[in-house]
Amino acid sequence: MQAQTEERRKLVLDTLKLAEKYEHVCHVLNFDLETICPPAAMEEQGDLIAYFEAEGFRLTKAPAFQEAAEYLYAHRDELDEADRVMADQLHRTYLHTRNITPEKMKEFSEVRNRAYVRWIEAKQASDFERFAPSLEDIVRIQREEVALRDQEDPAAPVPSVYDRLLDDYERGMTTEQLDACFEACKRRLIPLLDKIRKSTVRIRTDFLSRPVTDDAQARMARRMLEVLHFDFSRGNFTTTEHPFTDWLGRNDTRLTTHYHPDAFLSSIYSIIHESGHAFFEMLQPEEDRDHYITGGKTMGMHESVSRFYENLIGRSEAFIHLLYPMVCEIFPEAMEGVSERELYEAVNLVQPSLIRTEADEFTYTFHIIIRYEIEKLLMSGEIRTEDVPALWKAKYREYLGIEPVDDREGCLQDVHWSFGMGYFPTYALGNMYNAMYYKRIKAEMDLDGAVAAGDFASVNAWMADNVFRRGNRLTPAEWIREITGRDFTPDDYLDYLEEKYTDLYKL
Ligand SMILES: [Zn+2]
């Protein structure tokens, strides 16, 4: 490496190290905001986060830093892979943000924080009207953000606003690809759902809503994390309204769950899901951390991992074999007279429902398709925010045959729109990626045997080597091709569902 390049590389790394400190502070404050921060303090805390975000952002806006980062990008041939990925990521951020002043950045951040607070109020009151002005603001700032960006290739045609938002979360993904993918899902899943509905197989569910205490659920959550091989020296968990995982620092990954007194499986599965997210972050190569490129993985990759643990493992017969004695011990009253097979069937019950986070594995994709279709229309201006509740109802009726009675269980149920749009499709893509690498892990190790024996050290090690390792450095299309040797396809996922549910419902 040339001396001039080395000098700039050092400046870039030193600045990123400092910027990471601001980010760290924001994550700690945000985790607090979403867990134990009292309601009256939320707006103030939101302002505090916006302030530190803007300060961190200012560091990377310094002319010397930008010159150095762009120099590295221009001399990327001299760099090794980790440095090159760092230069690529910085260049992309530079194009996205160079026209955004710290004041603009602060304004966007404040709009989002306000929208989050309004969303909580609106959801509690089940009154979409209260959230509608904030949703309008979100649509407006997202259009503005995208309009302020410079394209990587200025000569290329400008993609739609929604395509550019999608690309933020799932690099390289387009509405054209997604439309085709979701059409394939509808084509195969709608007739299959119809058959499931007509099946004479009756799955027992009475025990699922038997009352349990928070105390017992907290014990179960901890036990589950221990079984999954979660490292408590580098992570922790607590409760919140809407479960999520956050990576605060190199040795600090936290996840959250929610205890429903009449749905003990809910917290168990949210713990498994969030553990997947946590592992992906905790088991990152150190070299990637040292280059500050761990933000390179996409949301679709992340969801593929969380859903791999939650569904492909968590809802398998092998896992239920492991789980059954634990739930019998911790929830003896709820599990009284329930067999292992009944537990397996219950965790795989197919039942069209209104709440995405409580949806079964089979109908889940419909919840995403509905949000995706509405988001596209909102961003293109084909519908207005006030049209959302009615359209939401109509689509639930069309795809799932049910509709919400109020906004709380309708279009206000998810937090995402207080941040922005383009994120939801990554949930569905995750299911499709993981079905692809599920085939490979099963060919390479006795996955069911390891799961039934509670040997998550082996499972996690396979995931770290094959799935986690290159996530920061590749686009999703390259990544899935490198893991599986094949191009992205929804077919493995649709085959998996068809096979599993044909068997379960004796279709
Ligand atoms: Zn998730």
Image (cartoon, grey):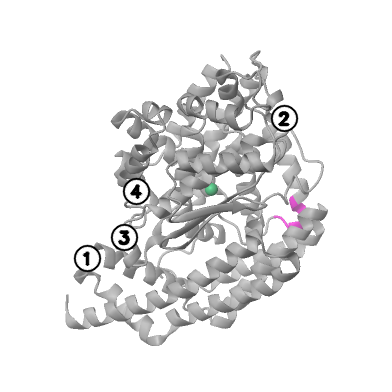
Is the stretch drawn in magenta largely helix, strand or loop?
A: helix
Q: Which one is in front in this view, the residue at disc 3 or the one at disc 1?
A: 3
Where disc 3 sits, the SS reads: helix
- Which image quarter is the N terminus in? bottom left
| Residue located 45% across and 25% down the image | 318
Specify the amino acid type for callout 2.
Answer: Arg
- N-terminal of the pair, mark 4 or mark 1, is 1
Determine if residue 180 is in view.
no
Where disc 2 sits, the SS reads: loop
Local crowd size for mark 4, using a 10 Å CA cut-off: few (<14), some (14–19), many (≥20): many
Specify the amino acid type for callout 4.
Answer: Trp
- Give the residue pinned by disc 2: 210
Q: Which one is in front in this view, the residue at disc 4 or the one at disc 3?
A: 3
Where disc 1 sits, the SS reads: loop
Extent of the magenta region = 383-388
In front here: 36 or 155? 36
The numbered mark at residue 80 is 1
Alpha carbon distance from label 4 to label 1: 19 Å
